[in-house]
Image (cartoon, grey):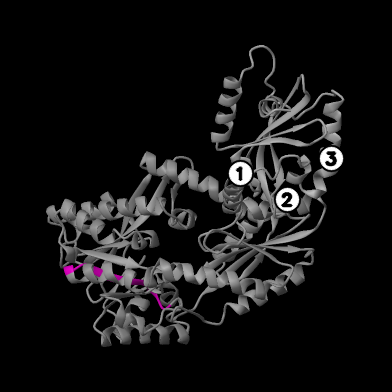
Amino acid sequence: MTGIDANEQAFGLQGPASSDTRVAGALGLVQAATYAFITNDSSGRITFVNDAAEALFGYGPGAMLGQNIDVVVPERFRASHAAGLARMVRNEPSRMAGRTIEVTARRCDGSEFPAEFTLSIWRDRFGLGFGAIMRDISEWRARDAHLVRLAHHDTLTGLPNRASFEETLDARLVAGQATCVLMLDLDGFKEVNDSCGHGTGDAVLQTLAIRLPAWLGADAILARFGGDEFAVMLPGATDPLKVAAGAAALLEAFAAPFCVLGHTFHLGVSVGGAISPTQGLSAGELVGNADLALFRAKQDGKRVFRLFQPEMRSALLSRLAMQSELRRAVAAGEFVLHYQPQVALENRCINGAEALLRWRHPERGSLYPGAFLPQLEEPPLALEVGRWILDEACRQAAAWRDAGLPIRKMGVNLFTAQVRSGTLTLDVADALQRHRLSPEMLELEITETIFLKVDEPVLRPFRDLHRRGVGISFDDFGTGYASLSSLKRFPLTRLKIDRGFVRDLMTDQHDAAIVRSIIQIGNDIGLDIIAEGIETADQEARLLEMGCKQGQGFLYAKALPAAQFEDLLQGFGPRQKIAS
């Protein structure tokens, strides 16, 4: 067969229209192509390859011609390949012809690679011919594998992500394999980011990704859901007591300090758990119930373990319904402020007021904060309502001042969300400027929740406001775990003695001793002292005797709507006192 004949056979060129020019043009086109072209006859003998094919398969010029097409087929696929070729020779229908598919191809050195493959079949005067166009798609597959990994793994820690975790969990549950899920949330991690930066925070998470598997045991499957939240799958764990024991060991492991990048951190962890099949039949249900248990653990003081109970879901639904109502209440303007007078104990003259939130519920009437505050304290609602309280209290104080009424200070309680917002200084300055109120007329009241997190980001706005003359009061002092050493770090102007100590002041020597100590500490470090919840003249007299000079409580007046409080102010001049 001449060279022209060989090329005619290779490309299926035949008939009167064939010519040397036509064959040469086709040959030039195929040789110049970047894709691999390869043809074989009905016996499987390779009849043509272009330069790209020789380069793709690693053969020298002409080395592939005459060999069986099996040389480019991995050995494990050769039998099925030969069977397929035989079917096409018998003129049986082929699912490969004319389609682009992915195959595994073999190089000269035996290495394999994924290839895109398109097959053509023809019959001519030389018989049956087969031609394939191929290209290496290794880079595509590597990129796809990378994308799959990104879709199933957390990029920071390398742990499985939520999608991968739930996919694995669902497979176990469908197979009827009992499993426990633990949800973990770090306590104190935000402070790591705030104090040392996100780079250090990332290093802490990466360290945990290494340590947690060792603490959890070989069978545990760990995943990172995002932020500082992790999930653990415990295959076969169905005994609540054993699950609780494992969670307790995890809590204990976190009791030791963390040393990362030269920093020492005291982190904790809150843990919630749910066990299949009794507490969840699908991945979504089991993870959701473990998450509810985690929420309860955080509500119960953090650094504890809670196992899911059905009533947790009822509590969640109630909480969600309340939050929906609160959003509606904000939009409808249903919140109002009442004001309780603060008096000088020696003469009962009014020298200030504390602004207290009330909800004028359209169906349930006036509600005290205890009925809705836990749901309101979460951002962004807390931030919106907190700013409104601040602005409304400043507006009212300015109105009373302009009316010549004896009001020297307005106390406003802060939400944690306001302190953490980063805008507290600006919010206070805006409210004071808007209503032309002197900073000395405003007092911000903070609770122990804020006080215990005495780090620089928290202190900075309070120090700034304190320098401007705004008063800062520690509400309910003595009821929790606030460190006495923190008193000198926080820029306070006043301590408020909790009503719980005042209530039993006359009958409980321990409460009396605590009240006396608080008064002495405050006086010694130059802080004003005010007692809450004074209800009797005897309590008032004892407090005066101990050195407390200010108070508030039902002995003087309950919290009143603005109009009634104004009547109280108008009825008593600056030197007149409130009668018992």
Q: Residue at x 67, y 29 (%)?
A: 3
- From what the image shows, is residue 19 above or below residue 270? above
Q: Is residue 507 magenta?
A: no
Q: Amino acid at mark 1?
A: Ile
- Give residue 169's position: percent from left, percent from top: 72, 54
Q: Amino acid at mark 2?
A: Asp
Which label was assigned to residue 580? none
In this picture, residue 379 sits left or right of residue 153? left
Asked which secondary structure carries label 3, the reply is helix
Q: Residue at x 37, y 77 (%)?
A: 539
- Give residue 531's position: percent from left, percent from top: 34, 74
Q: Quadrant of residue 355?
A: bottom left
Q: Which residue is mark 2?
A: 170
Residue situated furthest front in the rendering: 2
Q: Which residue is mark 3?
A: 80
Q: Earlier in the sequence, mark 1 or mark 3?
A: 3
Q: Main secondary structure of the magenta part?
A: strand
* Distance in Å between CA atoms under marks 3 and 2: 36 Å
Tell me the magenta residue range: 468-478
Q: Which residue is mark 1?
A: 137
Q: Residue at x 24, y 83 (%)?
A: 526
